[in-house]
Image: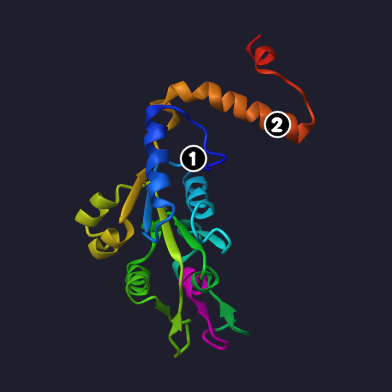
Amino acid sequence: GFEGIVGHSQAMENLLERMRIASPTRSTVLVVGESGTGKELVANALHQNSPRAQGPFVAINCGAIPGEILESELFGHEKGAFTGAHQRRIGLIERASGGTLFLDEISELSPDLQVKLLRVLEERHIMRVGGATQIPVDFRLVAATNRDLAEWVENGRFRQDLFYRLKVVELTIPPLRARKEDIPLFVQHFLEFFNTELDRSVHSGEWQR
């Protein structure tokens, strides 16, 4: 049920078991792992194996968008809310209603946006930038980080109340160096992928020679 996630090491079996438990719930999930470990893959697998699978999976990298633009991306805005807002824009939180919202690099949210996201998680309403109407939203949040958020909380860089709201379920993805027994599976996985992609028929024995 978790296609695309490669691994049969004990660390991955533990992760998959926690995913099986978390998938059918409404609980907010915090996915922790180094860059390149597949955090969005895990988030999408949680969505695809949840009761919300028929709804949208909406993903955004919070570290890739400047803070002043990120608020509009997340919450949307009304026409005339700011210079250049020539028409109403529906934000990603609103678009994720009925499905899953994936916020990658959640640590990069500004303090102001941390407060606003916490309010959304508590009240399940949003207000578009420049708007005056509370809009109900129904989404599951999966957040991800490659930071030690507990340390950031201690240093005052991340809100403690939001941190606990995010880590109702915490999933840690082990790096490949911690599960070397999975490397042959990755070799086979990518051989099959590129054989299909490039219309080839290279086999693992040929690769080993």
**Up/down of 178 relative to 25, above or below:** above
Q: Position of residue 44 (x, y in %)?
A: 52, 51
The residue where tag 1 is placed is: 36
The colour style of the image is: rainbow
Q: Nearer the viewer, residue 35 or 21?
A: 21
Give the residue type that dot 1 points to: Gly
Look at the numbered disc 2 and give the secondary structure of its residue: helix
**Which residue sits at x=32%, y=72%?**
115
Q: Residue 75, percent across and down?
A: 48, 75
65 or 102: nearer the viewer:
102
Residue span colored magenta = 68-82
**Relative image position of residue 163 (x, y in whole percent):** 28, 59
Residue for point 45% across, 21% down? 181
Is 74 one of the magenta-colored residues?
yes
Q: Can the viewer see residue 158? A: no
184 to 86, vertically: above or below: above
**In which quadrant of the rendered image does the C terminus lie?**
top right
Position of residue 15 relative to residue 100, above or below, is above
Residue beneath disc 2: 194
Farthest left residue?
154
